[in-house]
Amino acid sequence: MTTQAAADPTKRLMDVVDGTWPAADYMAIGPWCLRRGAGGGKRVSAASTDQPVTPAQIAAAAAAMQDLGQHPLFRLTGDQQALDDTLAGQGYRLVDPVNVYLASATAMATQPLPPACSAMEIWEPLAIQKEIWAEGGIGPGRIAVMERARGPRVSLLGRWENSPAATAFVALHDGVAMLHALEVRADFRGKRLGYAMMIRAAAWAQAQGAEEFSVICTKANVAGNALYSRLGMTVIGSYHYREQAPDAPQ
């Protein structure tokens, strides 16, 4: 998790990411927090720090990630320009800029559900949910991340009329709910099912005592960003990754 507490809202939400979408392991290497992702994607595989670092410490973190069988990958928030410039100068390329959204759980939960849409709370996820996730590229490595979450957690199965059509995962950390892995089947997109899933997720979070509801979304995901904006969620910050180019010296 982050190496020190921070008042910056983006960094606070980074702790929520770690709490609701946890890596298989966390390791401290000098000023770095290293994550072993075990196939769970960038969120659980990137190294991060809140401290100033030297080129030697960057090299040590990269070597440690390689020892874990992972490609060197660093996560940076918007206030880490000096580190970002250093990594860029070393040939690390910019990957996946991400928007961080936050809203009142109550304001989200009290919005009306669109017609013909419903969602039910389920734990553990059903086979049909895993099938829907797999259609969107969310495989066993990410399902394992959901299973590792230790706080309150739930999956949602969304339906359009009588057809299973969507799924998502939501969990709580430190009083904040975060939704992950929202997937709507291709044949059911455009029916406001994603909207309904967000409302139901916020209602579950509110029932668990959460005051805030959050989600993170790559800036390239036009549909996702439009959905969260329509729901009245606010972008409170952003982060991105720097990844070692495949042909960079090891």
Image (tube, helix red, strand yellow):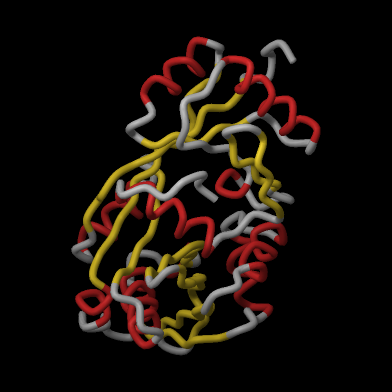
Question: Where is residue 139, by image quadrant?
Answer: bottom right
Q: Residue at x 42, y 69 (%)?
A: 174
Q: Residue at x 63, y 32 (%)?
A: 30
Task: Give left or right: position of 220 versus 130.
Answer: left
The vertical placement of 6 against 53, above or below, is: below
- Total marks in image: 0
Residue 38 drawn at (x, y percent)? 74, 51
User: Is residue 82 or residue 178 the one in the foreground?
Assistant: 82
Q: Quadrant of the C terminus?
A: top right
Q: Residue at x 28, y 60 (%)?
A: 102
Task: Give left or right: position of 105 versus 13.
Answer: left
Residue 90 drawn at (x, y percent)? 55, 12
The vertical placement of 41 against 181, above or below, is: above
Residue 19 drawn at (x, y percent)? 53, 62
Question: Where is residue 84, by image quadrant?
Answer: top left
Residue 124 drawn at (x, y percent)? 64, 82
The vertical placement of 221 against 145, above or below, is: above
